[in-house]
Amino acid sequence: MAKALKTFIAVALGLFFCVKVLPILAIVLYFKFFFVDHDAMELDKAPPMQNYEQNREKFLDLLAFADRNFPKNLRVTIQSTYGDEYIWIDLDGNKTKFYSNSIFKDSAPGIGEGLKLIGWDKKTFVELKSKLAAINARTIVLNRSSDSGVPWAEITYRYVEHFTDSYQFYAPDSPKLAKLHAKGCSKKFQSDGVVFLFENTTSGSYRAFCSGDDDNKSVLIEKHDL
C-alpha cells in the first residue's frame, strides 16, 4: 500500500511538473533568449563617459586606424554587429550600402564589393571589427566628404530601435566642437575633441542630448547643432 501511494505521488508530481512547471519554464527561457538584448544589458553596466574613460587609448587607436585606412573625401559607415554587417559609402551625396548577412542581401550589393571600393581585404575588416568589439562599440562613421563643412567621426556605443549613445569626434580647434561645448557638452576630454551624445528618435521626432561634466546632467541640443 505504501509503495503504491509513493508511486501515485511520484506520478502526480511528474504530471504537475509537465503540465504546470515546464510550460512556465519554457516561456521564461523563450523570452530570455529571444527578447532580451544581452548586449544592451552588458553595455548598461558601462555608461558612455565611463566606457570612454576606461577605454580611451583603444578609442584613439580605433580612430587612428580609421584615419589610416578609410578613403579620403568620403563618408564611410561600417557596422559589424547584429549579424547585419554593412558598409555605407556616401560619395558626393550618392549613398550606396553594401550588405552582409542581411535580409536585404538579395537586393543589395554584397559587402565584398564595398570592401573593394574602399581598398580593403577581409583581414582589414576583421581587424576593424575586433577594435570595435574591444570598446563595446558597434558602428563607426568617418565623415570626410567634400560636402561636409567640418570633418568628424562618430562611434556608436549602443544601438536599439529608437536611440543611440555615441561619441562624436572633432578637431580640438573645430568651431563645431566649440559650439557644442558652449551648449554645455562635457569638456572632460576636451583635448580629444570628443562629445558624448544621446540621440532619441520617436514618432518621427528627433531629440539629442549632450552629456555634461556632471554624469547626471544632460543638455538638450538641436539637430542642426550636431
Image (cartoon, rainbow, N blue to C red):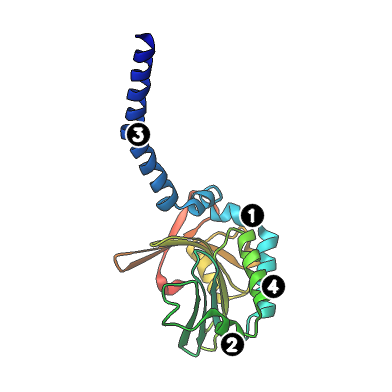
| Tag 4: amino acid | Ala
Q: Which residue is mark 1?
A: 53
**Real-space Cα distance between discs 3 and 1?**
50 Å
Task: Point out residue 186 in the picture as x, y percentages from the top left corner.
Answer: 55, 59
Quarter of the figure with the N terminus:
top left
Q: Where is residue 137, by image quadrant?
A: bottom right
According to the picture, the residue beneath numbered tag 4 turns out to be: 64
Q: Which is closer to the viewer, label 4 or label 1? A: 4
Say which quarter of the image contains residue 128: bottom right
Q: Are marks 4 and 2 in contact (CB under 8 Å)?
A: no
- The picture places residue 159, in percent across and down from the top left corner, at 47, 61
Can you tell which of label 3 and label 1 is closer to the viewer? Answer: 3
Mark 4 to mark 3 CA distance (whole Å): 57 Å
Task: Estimate the spatial distance between the alpha carbons at disc 2 and disc 3, rounded to whole Å.
Answer: 57 Å
Image check: 15 left or right of 199?
left
Instruction: Judge whether residue 209 can be spotted in this image.
Output: no
For the point 29% across and 65% down, which residue is it?
203
Q: Which mark is residue 18?
A: 3
Residue 9, percent from left and from top? 35, 18
Disc 4 versus disc 1: distance between alpha carbons? 17 Å
What element does badge 4 sit on?
helix
Question: Residue type at mark 2?
Answer: Leu
